[in-house]
Image (spheres, rainbow, N blue to C red):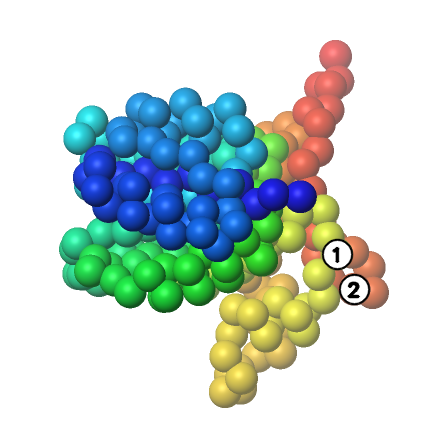
Amino acid sequence: MVTRILVVDDAPKLLMLVAERLESEGYAVDRAGSGASALERGSATEYDAIVLDLRLPDMDGVDVCRRLRLAGCWAPVLMLTARDGVDDRVVGLDAGADDYLTKPFAFTELLARVRALVRRACQPRPATLVHGDLSVDPATRTVRRGTHAIHVTAKEFALLEYFMRHPDVAIGRGRLMGHVWDSGYHGDSNVVDVYVARLRAKLAPDNGGVVIETVRGIGYRLVSRRAAARPA
C-alpha cells in the first residue's frame, strides 16, 4: 500500500523540493499552495501524514490544522515555520499538530520526522475532548457543559481530563493517584475520593448527562447517561 503525503506551502520552490524529495523516498505526494486547497484535499483524501507550512497566503497554518481536526482529519501533521519562538510552537501543537520543524531544516531530518509520523498512523487526537454534553479544552484549561462554563481547580482539571481521555472505562484509585498526584505525595489516602466528590458537585447534571459513577471494588468511571424522564 502506497503511503500518501500532503505537502502544503505557498513558496513554489520549497513546495517542489519537499515534494520531490518525498517522492524520491517512495511516497505518493499531493501538493497544496494555500490553506483553502489544503482543507479541500485534507477533507477529501485520507493522508498518512501532512507537512504543513505555518505561514500561508489566505489563512494561518494553525487555523488550517484546527479546521482539519474539526472536520475529522486525523492525519499526523508536521508543521513547518520560520518562527522559532516557544509560544508559536505551543499554539501549533495545541491546535492539533503532532510535530514542529523550524526553517531552514535539513531534508534528512524532515524525512526522519515524516517516517516517525507515518508510524503513528491516523488516530483521533481532538484538541478539545468531548463526551456527551461535556467538553474539556486542555489548551485553555476550560470545562463546559453545553454552553455553561464550569470553573475547576488545577487538580480537578487534571483529574477530569484523565477521565475524559478514558471515557466509559473503570479506573482504579491508584491509577488516578499516579496520574494526577506525583510520587512524592504523602497526604490523605482518600484524596481521590475527595476530588471526585468535588467534581461531581460541580458537574452535577440536573437530569442525565455526563457523570462520574462509582465502580464497586475498583474506582470510578465517566459515563454519559441519557436524560431520564421526570416523574409526572
Q: Position of residue 17 (x, y in %)?
A: 29, 48
Asked whether residue 74 appears in the rendered view, the answer is no
The kind of residue tagged 2 is: Ile
Q: Secondary structure at mark 2?
A: loop
Q: Residue at x 44, y 64 (%)?
A: 112
In the displayed structure, 166 sits above or below 116; it is above
Which residue occupies the extreme right position in the image? 217
Q: Which residue is mark 2?
A: 218
Q: Nearer the viewer, residue 198 or 17?
A: 17
Q: Is residue 213 above or below residue 133?
A: below
Between 220 and 62, which is closer to the camera in this rendering? 62
Which picture quadrant has residue 95?
A: top left
* Nearer to us in this view, 184 or 10: 10
Residue at 64% over, 52% down:
166
Checking the image for residue 170, the label placed there is 1
117 and 125: which one is in front?
117
What residue is rendered at 67% in x and 36% in y? 224
